[in-house]
Amino acid sequence: MKVALSGTIVSLGGLTNLIDRELVMTSVTVSSKFQIVIPKDVREAMGIVSGQKIQMLTYRNRIELIPIKPMKRMKGFLKGIDTEVERDKDRV
């Protein structure tokens, strides 16, 4: 079953930005071994590859899967970030 949502969705961390597009939620079935298959369109959109580690967390009544990116892919992630910090006058 697929449910289409519309609106503006911007994700952080260099993930796919979906702005003024349709977001499709797909339901999956849990196997007898408690396994699920991540749909191909989700894998491609998130850049998930076979053997990649995924962090799983539970929050309230939902499960979130967060792909763990290799450190090499994170190079330049914070490029352009403002590193200036205002310090109190009594601090060095």
Image (spheres, rainbow, N blue to C red):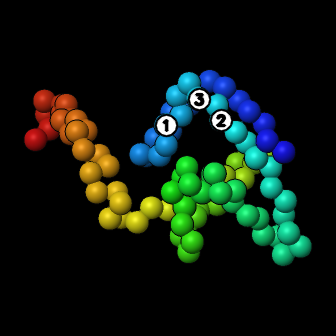
Query: Whole-Å distance between the Cαs marked 1 and 3?
Result: 9 Å
Q: Is residue 32 left or right of residue 45?
A: right
**First reached walking from the N terminus: tag 2 or tag 1:** 1
Q: Assign the C terminus to one quadrant of the image.
A: top left
Is disc 2 in contact with disc 3, using a CB cutoff of under 8 Å? Answer: yes
Dot 1, crowdedness within 10 Å: few (<14), some or many (≥20)?
some
Badge 3 marks a residue whose secondary structure is strand
Query: Whole-Å distance between the Cαs marked 2 and 1?
Result: 11 Å
Q: Is residue 57 left or right of residue 44?
A: right
Q: Which residue is mark 3?
A: 21
Kind of residue at badge 3: Arg
Query: Whole-Å distance between the Cαs marked 2 and 3?
Result: 6 Å
Badge 1 marks a residue whose secondary structure is loop
Dot 3, crowdedness within 10 Å: few (<14), some or many (≥20)?
few
The label on residue 17 is: 1
Is disc 1 in contact with disc 3, using a CB cutoff of under 8 Å? Answer: no
Q: Assign the N terminus to one quadrant of the image.
A: top right
Q: Quadrant of residue 7?
A: top right
Kind of residue at badge 1: Asn
Res 58 seen here: no
Which of these two is toward me, 68 or 89? 68
Q: Position of residue 5 (x, y in %)?
A: 71, 30
Res 74 seen here: yes
Q: Which residue is mark 2?
A: 23
Q: Position of residue 60 (x, y in %)?
A: 75, 45
Kind of residue at badge 2: Leu
